[in-house]
Image (cartoon, helix red, strand yellow):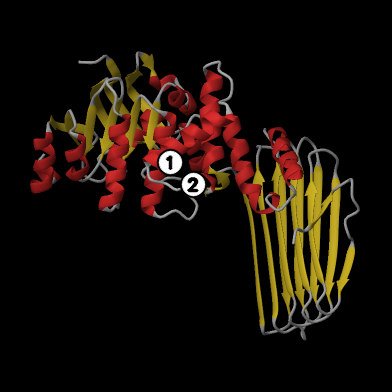
Amino acid sequence: MGKVLLKIENLHAGIAGKEILKGIDLTINEGEVHALMGPNGAGKSTLSAVLTGRPDFVVTEGSVTFRGKDLLAMAPEERAWAGLFLSFQYPIEIPGVSISNFMKSAINAKRKAQGLKDIAPGDYLRLLKEKMAMVKMKGEFAKREVNVGFSGGEKKRNEIFQMAMLEPVLSILDETDSGLDVDALKIVSDGVDALRTPQSGFIVITHYPSLLESMKPDAVHVLKNGRIACTGGMEVAQKVQTDGFESF
Amino acid sequence: MAPKVYIAGRDEIPRKVSLGAGEELDILFVVFPGADCSIEVDVDLCGPGADAQIRGLYLATGNQKVDIALDVRHSAGGCHSRQLVKGIASGSARANFYGRIYVAQDAQKTKAYQENHNILASEKAKIGTKPQLEIYADDVECSHGATIGRLNEDEQFYMRSRGIPEAEARVLQMISFLAPVAGLLPEDLANQVYESLSQCQD
């Protein structure tokens, strides 16, 4: 078993005075993939928002450590520098900013935080091409404005592309598979496979077992009413598929 | 065709323009951080088929005061006009936009559009916008839109979640906001605008 990547203890959190997470305990070790399932409103997206530091969410109790550091004390950008990544359920459009410039800003900000110089233009171009090929995006993709005029599938592929560019240690995929056709789903799962290392971890939030079948999670959790109601292996995902969330 | 660019305080921006049949005006003004300025442009489309495009952007910082007044009069029919002004006020700056579209009774088949969008980048900055439509013809296509807002927080969080620090994310958001106007500038001038954005913080 690898070292502990993320340790969530008794996490209570909410938004606008309403408690949504009511005591979450979850530990993710290096090299592990954890699936998070649950009905709408169970708190799945709240958990990803709290872990990545969305300003409007408030933690009222509990702790989260990421690679031994207090995650909740870090600004969103510091969490990214430390190796946390969220694939957004609803990626944001940024008109007037190209994907290439957006990613260059992100990479150089992290390098700056690490005391490194900006990435050399040639190295950046190579990285861009390599990762674009990985998500099967064509050359003009990097010049497009971030998510502007993208189809649902393209937005999700762009999230996976960004994940590949930033090489995170822990990636949270928030319903990245929702609304994807078979081909796009394969691109997502291939992307995740390519980024899986003995040191990296994944939290995959999903409604469907199909992505999980290819990802072979180490644990499947069912989140219900702000708590983890059940933890197991793929059999839990199968039970969700056949019986729904009522049975948990 | 690129618009003719005017820098407030450096160039003399046309004050009154009348356009005869088929004549065109395509201007873009830029207000950089610094001195107070007042921009007034009156355009009269007095010959059929005339076309006027007035675009502008302003960056107001410190105690700067920026006044912009555009008056577009459609005296003749079958003319087109577009106004697009985008700006950011920070510090204790004040910006006021007044824009009018006037369509005379005989100016049928007029197409006239006006948009003014503004960002308040600080608590103390103040922005006013006063769009006006005065239409006396009945067969026209006119629209106007005016907004005053703050930088979008979802956008900001998206950028920060990728590792872009807050201050830099704000600058990127401003670039994104200004792009429809700044994108028409020659590259060196556009870069000058983008570089000035770091001054548009609280």
Give the chain letter at badge 2.
Answer: A
Q: How many marks?
A: 2
Q: Residue at x 91, y 53 (%)?
A: B12
Residue type marked 2? Gly
2 or 1: tag closer to the N-terminus: 1
Give the image location of residue A5, x and y in percent. Answer: 30, 19
Q: Mark 2 — residue?
A: A139
Q: Residues within 10 Å of mark 2 (few under 14, many from 20)?
A: few
The C terminus of chain A sits in image quarter:
top left
- Residue A169 visible from this viewpoint: yes
Asked whether, in this view, residue B31 is left or right of residue A98, the answer is right
Asked whether, in this view, residue B76 is left or right of residue A205, the answer is right
Q: Residue at x 57, y 35 (%)?
A: B169
Give the image location of residue B150, x and y in percent. Answer: 60, 44
Q: Where is A79 relative to A221, above or below?
A: above
The N terminus of chain A sits in image quarter:
top left
Give the image location of residue A68, x and y in percent. Answer: 35, 13
Give the image location of residue B148, x and y in percent. Answer: 64, 51
Q: Mark 1 — residue?
A: A132
Q: Where is A183 relative to B168, above or below?
A: below
Asked whether, in this view, residue B78 is left or right of residue A202, the answer is right
* CB within 8 Å, label 2 to label 1: yes
Residue type marked 1? Met
- Residue A224 visible from this viewpoint: no
Q: Which element type, helix, strand or loop, lies under badge 2?
A: helix
Give the chain letter at badge 1.
Answer: A
C-alpha distance separating marks 2 and 1: 8 Å
Camera-side residue of A129 and B44? A129
Q: Which quadrant of the figure has residue A193?
A: top left
Q: Which element type, helix, strand or loop, lies under badge 1?
A: helix
Camera-side residue of A83 and A160? A160
